[in-house]
Amino acid sequence: LTLKLLQNLPFPLAAPSANPFGYISPTSPAHVLQNLGDKVLYILDGGPCELGIESTIVGLGDDCLLIYRLGAISVEKIATIAKTDNIKIITDVSRQIEFPGLSKTHYAPHKKMILGDIEELLKSHDLKNVGILSFKNIHSQIDLEKQVILSRKGSLEEAAKHLFSALRKLDQLQIPTILAEYVPDEGLGRAINDRLTRAAAKTK
């Protein structure tokens, strides 16, 4: 779709994200409309995002591959394609800031968001005032309409696809706090956990 757009334009195209800085990334045309409203004249409708999270940003080091931003292509898949295990994930914030989506606070809902063991967090919160973002489990203490499950079958790919739409849904509920948990820290789970950490950073 993007290539077709470029082929029909008589000029180069440069554009920022269709999103207010730091807020939850849009993954559907409806999200873009919610974000920008009458600030844009047109929205090119390509349907919902297939992968759900942003691209992986990869660079070349002197003797290794560098991952500047974890994303929709896992480190394991990159290792397989590149035929190397010599991959370094950059954690130096001063270097990260050169790349998009890597400020300490990013992808964040307006609500307060707390990460941890959900069952333990529920013990110290008013159950009427929280929503839940869980990987695959339902928590019986909370009304179902205040819970979003990323993947009932425990699929990291499905969880990645649903992550940002789930955060938006919870952010629109009449609750002050979102309780969330990390997913398994492997494959796409690393990128999901990176987004969750940044989303919750502003409340720390």
Image: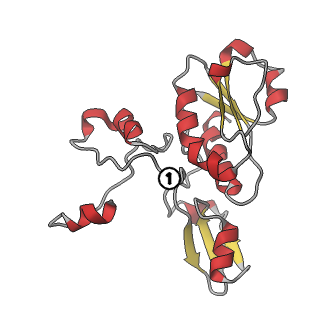
In the drawing, does residue 127 fall left or right of residue 166? Answer: right
Q: Which residue is mark 1?
A: 50
Percent of width and height locating residue 130? 68, 20
Tell me which residue sits at (68%, 77%) in the image: 80
Figure check: 127 above or below 5: above
Residue 194 shows in this picture: no
Figure check: 125 above or below 47: above
The answer to which quarter of the image holds residue 67 is bottom right
* Residue type at the position of mark 1: Glu
Residue 112 shows in this picture: yes
Q: How is the structure coloured here? A: secondary structure
Farthest residue, direction bottom: 63
Tell me which residue sits at (70%, 56%) in the image: 190
Residue in front for this viewpoint, 96 or 58: 58
Tell me which residue sits at (79%, 20%) in the image: 140
Dot 1 alpha-carbon crowd within 10 angstroms: few under 14, some 14 to 19, many 20 or more: few
The answer to which quarter of the image holds residue 76 is bottom right
Figure check: 78 above or below 202: below
- Quarter holding the N terminus is bottom left
Percent of width and height locating residue 89? 68, 68
The answer to which quarter of the image holds residue 166 is top right
**Is label 1 in a helix, a strand or a loop?**
loop
Figure check: 161 above or below 180: below
Tell me which residue sits at (63%, 78%) in the image: 81
Percent of width and height locating residue 5? 25, 61
